[in-house]
Image: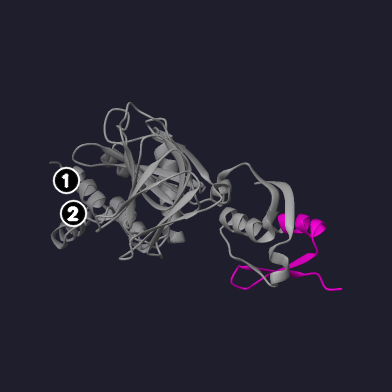
Amino acid sequence: MKVLDRIWELLVIRITGRATKEDDTELRSLLKDDPSLKRAFNTIERSHFVWNTKVIDNRRDNVWEKIEQGIQKEKSRLRIVRMWRYAAAACISLIAIGGFTLSYLTKDSEMIIAMNTEEEARFITLPDSSEVWLGKGSKIEYPENMKTGDRTVSLEGKAYFHVRKDNGKKFKVLTDIGEVTVLGTRFDITKESSENTMEVVLEEGSVRLEGNGRSEEVILKPGEMGIVKVNDGIKVKDVNAYLYTAWKDEYLNIESLPLKDVVFMLEQRYDTHIVIGENSLRDEVLSGRFGKELSLEDVFHTLGFIISIQWEKKPDGSYLLTPCKE
């Protein structure tokens, strides 16, 4: 193997979290004679980049955004060795983009990693024509050959899936808490990195929900939420599925909903925390339609015309809703 090819192979191994001490030692030794590659490596190191990390670091995101733009100048999807050869040039002061997509090789196939760094949902069409809306800060990993091979994806964060039926071939979503198996359906799944809970809300079809490390499994019906907790089995409850899936849509359509439900939908859409300061407001009934181009403050302003509320943004970024003062 050529020295340059070995350098890029070791970089890939390190970035995907599979490097041994021997790999790191070899990489540092090889980089001594190539200043440009060493600069690219140092850029990644300064970004505290570890691909398997559960912490979304803004500096790390910036590096990947720059790398992605450099990749797109070549072609939409590259083999990982070639991709990383362009990474050094891509790290030189490029305009940041919102979501990014990367690829890398495994023994059997090429894997695609897509992440959303924007406030709004990112729409992705998978190779089998299934559709995914990826929430802010969320990441999905899937094989490039889904049309003919495995239909298994890995998720960190929040996503809504519209899974296409494919001659009975199963579709699986894996998280570190549990997995969801479907044939053709629409559902929302949330697995936050800081929590030991996975929530699955089924809008249409049927899914089988399993927790990692336990033999228990549950079949969900439309309008049900399955909650998987580490070492606590699976619990099921009835929910209004729309409250959990509307975050991805162009418009929030609110029809005779209490304020407590409207606040829940706004929290999902704007990725924030909203506190209703007085219980008397919780059951105030509202109707309306809000486009995703509106800021949260714009929505509050409109709600203020319907019911007598005022809002305050707290230092931690959350909001407090209270009745208007006389």
Does 113 appear above or below 227?
A: above
Determine which of the numbered discs, if any, sits on residue 166 in the image. Answer: none
Mark 2: few, some, or many residues within 10 Å (few <14, many ≥20)? Answer: some
Q: Residue at x 62, y 41 (%)?
A: 250
Mark 1: few, some, or many residues within 10 Å (few <14, many ≥20)? Answer: few
Labels 2 and 1 touching (C-beta < 8 A): yes
Look at the image and give the residue range highlighted in magenta.
Answer: 298-326
Q: Which residue is drawn at 32% across and 34% down?
A: 144
Mark 2: amino acid: Leu
Mark 1: amino acid: Val
Does 19 appear above or below 87?
A: below
Q: Does the magenta stretch include residue 310?
A: yes
Earlier sequence position, callout 2 versus callout 1: 1
Q: Name the residue under label 1.
A: 3
- Label 2: which secondary element: helix
Q: Residue 92, position in %: x, y?
A: 43, 50
Q: Is residue 86 left or right of residue 132?
A: left
Q: In this view, does 311 lie to the left or right of 94?
A: right
Q: Residue 132, position in %: x, y?
A: 46, 40
Quarter of the image where one finds residue 282 = bottom right
Q: Name the residue under label 2.
A: 30
